[in-house]
């Protein structure tokens, strides 16, 4: 199985800050990497697919980058509604696997 | 607008079989691929299965053959059966749409149900 390691596991930032979350895969992923946001008590929501493609309806302050085994989710100008846990997910091989999550808190 | 709604038994006793159904509205399950994903309380996400009308069904080996899943196009429903359940199977179970054409593109798991909580307890 491909292991997905996210860092940090949690962070606290202020409204307006730029936040960066890192995801490292145990194998090369080509472009098959997605990011999800899960607000408390809610189902996950797709933010980014294919490394850097923004899902329809997702604010442009979210962006994704990376290649190979190392990927990044950036939130520019953090907003109060961005309080959530963020997960990366690989889709290059079965079983599909997710990172352990990064919990983002607002100072 | 595509909507997914899971339904399930709630509590299940150890060693019994868990059965879940997901009703899809606003889209045909003959299109796209469909998945079950679970999440124990306070923990991360575990992908269970992908079902594609034209691409077959793929299971997570971690479930050791205890799982089976089907698509019922007549009812536009997905179903999941998990046998010999233990406390480790206690989780929120989500059905979801995978926007993927195997071998061509993968646009992520783009629609999720609200999830149904399954508790395994005697």
Image (cartoon, helix red, strand yellow):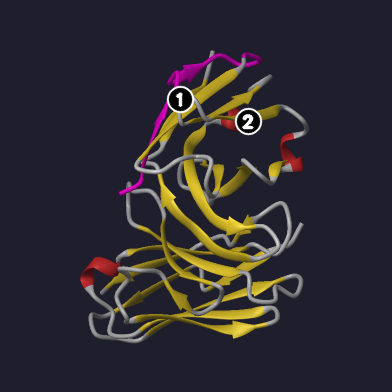
Question: Going by the image, does A35 lie left or right of B25?
Answer: right
Q: Say if residue B86 shows up in the picture.
A: no
Question: Above or below — where is B111 with respect to B81?
Answer: below
Judging from the image, mark 1 belongs to the subunit labelled B
Position of B120 compared to B51: left or right?
A: left
Measuring from the top left, give residue B75's x and y in whole percent.
45, 25
For the residues carrying marks 2 and 1, which lies nearer the camera in this image?
1
Residue B78: x and y, percent? Answer: 52, 31
Q: CA distance from mark 2 to mark 1?
A: 15 Å
Label 2–label 1 contact, CB within 8 A: no
- In magenta segment, residue B81: no
Circle 1: element type = loop
Quarter of the picture containing the N terminus of chain A is bottom right
Residue A84 placement, left or right of A66: left
> Which residue occupies 23% across, 80% down?
A15
Of residue B80 and residue B53, the one placed in the foreground of this image is B53
| Numbered circles on residues, count | 2
Q: Nearer the viewer, residue A97 or A84?
A: A97
Give the class, few, some or many, for how many residues have Cα within 10 Å of label 2's Cα (few <14, many ≥20).
many
What is the number of the mark on residue B75? 1
Q: In this orientation, which residue lies closer to the viewer: A12 or A22?
A: A22
- B35 over A87 or under it: above or below: above
Q: Quadrant of the C terminus of chain A?
A: bottom left
Q: Residue at x 40, y 43 (%)?
A: B27
Q: Which mark is residue B69?
A: 2
Range of magenta residues? B1-16
Q: Is residue B77 left or right of residue A23?
A: left
Q: Secondary structure at mark 2?
A: strand
Image quadrant assignment for residue A78 = bottom left
Q: Residue B29: where, in percent of width, then height?
A: 50, 39
Where residue B42 sits in the image (x, y, percent)? 46, 47
The vertical placement of B1 against B9, above or below, is below
């Amino acid at each position: 199985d491909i292991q997905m390691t996210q860092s940090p596991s949690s962070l606290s930032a202020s409204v307006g800050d730029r936040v960066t979350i890192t995801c490292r895969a145990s194998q090369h992923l080509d472009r098959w990497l997605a990011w999800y946001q899960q607000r408390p008590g809610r189902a996950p929501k797709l933010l980014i697919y294919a490394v850097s493609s923004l899902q329809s309806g997702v604010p442009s302050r979210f962006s994704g980058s990376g290649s190979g085994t190392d990927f990044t989710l950036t939130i520019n100008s953090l907003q109060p509604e961005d309080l959530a846990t963020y997960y990366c997910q690989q889709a290059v091989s079965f079983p599909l696997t997710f990172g352990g999550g990064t919990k983002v808190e607002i100072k | 607008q595509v909507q997914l709604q899971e339904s399930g038994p709630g509590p299940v006793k150890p060693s019994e079989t868990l059965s879940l159904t997901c009703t899809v509205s606003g889209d045909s399950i003959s299109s796209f691929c469909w998945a079950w994903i679970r999440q124990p309380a306070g923990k991360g996400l575990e992908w269970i299965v992908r079902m594609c009308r034209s691409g077959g069904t793929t299971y997570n080996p971690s479930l050791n053959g205890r799982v089976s899943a089907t698509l019922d196009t007549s009812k536009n429903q997905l179903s999941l059966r998990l046998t010999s359940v233990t406390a480790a199977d206690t989780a929120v179970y989500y059905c979801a749409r995978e926007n993927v054409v195997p071998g061509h593109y993968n646009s992520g798991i783009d629609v999720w149900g609200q999830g149904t909580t399954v508790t395994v307890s005697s």
